[in-house]
Amino acid sequence: MNPERPRVLCVDDEPSVLDGLKLHLHRLYEVQTAASGTQGLDLIQSAGQQPFAVVLSDMRMAGMDGATFLGQVRRQAPDTVRMLLTGQVDLESAITAVNEGQIFRFLTKPCPPKTLLAAFEAATDQYRLITTERVLLEQTLRGIVKTLTDILALTNPAAFGRANRIRRHAIDLANRLGVTQDWWQLDVAAMLSQLSCII
């Protein structure tokens, strides 16, 4: 993702609304649009290594409403910040959206450009915070476990060698099975198994 132009996705079944959103956001963001929740989920799934920082969805859409869509986004791309755009706010819809999609902000139609831009700026800041924190925690955990493994390897080199072979086999097996998501968790688990073998 280009840090200067974060990727954002706007989902609405009204083409004129999507055109307006794109017009106001295109200078600061790499904007993609979808005319339905299903199209939006397809774009999120195909995002791969360049996830969307923010997803904005209309509440009332044919087929899949915004709360259901944002709930699916939360499951597929939990780091992506989710916002809801709605013309009618009723308490039940708001509760559903918060519970299903764990949304960051509500925006109402028509949304003034200043409000829209401020919401997207806050949402992209939130995305950066979430992803930076996660990466920092992953690196810290791996570093701590690796340091412990290295120290304990000095005390029992034979056990360390056996545990290291098991670790390589576990990672190789995961790669052959296509378990590539969250590989760092597998690597940390393998390191922890090394520790248990050495201790």
Image (spheres, helix red, strand yellow):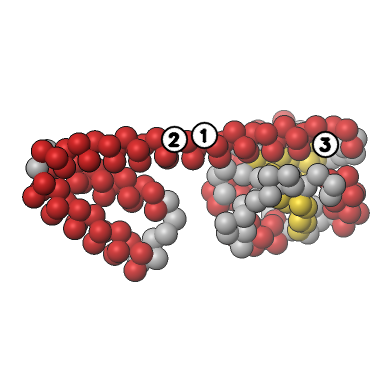
- Identity, as a three-letter code, of the amino acid under mark 1: Glu
Badge 1 density bin: few <14, some 14–19, many ≥20, Cα 10 Å: few
Which image quadrant for residue 168? bottom left
**Residue 17 spot, x, y in % from top left:** 88, 50
* Disc 3 and disc 2 in contact, CB within 8 angstroms: no
Q: CA distance from mark 3 to mark 1?
A: 24 Å
Badge 3 density bin: few <14, some 14–19, many ≥20, Cα 10 Å: some
Q: Residue at x 67, y 34 (%)?
A: 125
Is residue 66 visible to the viewer in this orientation of the structure?
A: no
**Residue 157 spot, x, y in % from top left:** 11, 46
- Identity, as a three-letter code, of the amino acid under mark 3: Leu
Which image quadrant for residue 104? top right
Q: Residue at x 35, y 41 (%)?
A: 142
The answer to whether 90 is drawn above or below residue 187 in the figure is above
Which is more foreground, mark 3 or mark 1? 1
Of residue 172 and residue 85, the one placed in the foreground of this image is 172
* Disc 1 and disc 2 in contact, CB within 8 angstroms: yes
Q: CA distance from mark 1 to mark 2?
A: 6 Å
Q: Secondary structure at mark 3?
A: helix
Q: Residue at x 42, y 40 (%)?
A: 138
Of residue 180 and residue 83, the one placed in the foreground of this image is 180
Which of pointers 3 and 2 lies earlier in the amino acid sequence? 3
Q: Secondary structure at mark 1?
A: helix
The residue wearing badge 1 is 133
Kindly identify which numbered label has been placed on residue 117.
3
The residue wearing badge 2 is 137
Q: CA distance from mark 3 to mark 2?
A: 30 Å
Which of pointers 3 and 1 lies earlier in the amino acid sequence? 3
Q: Secondary structure at mark 2?
A: helix
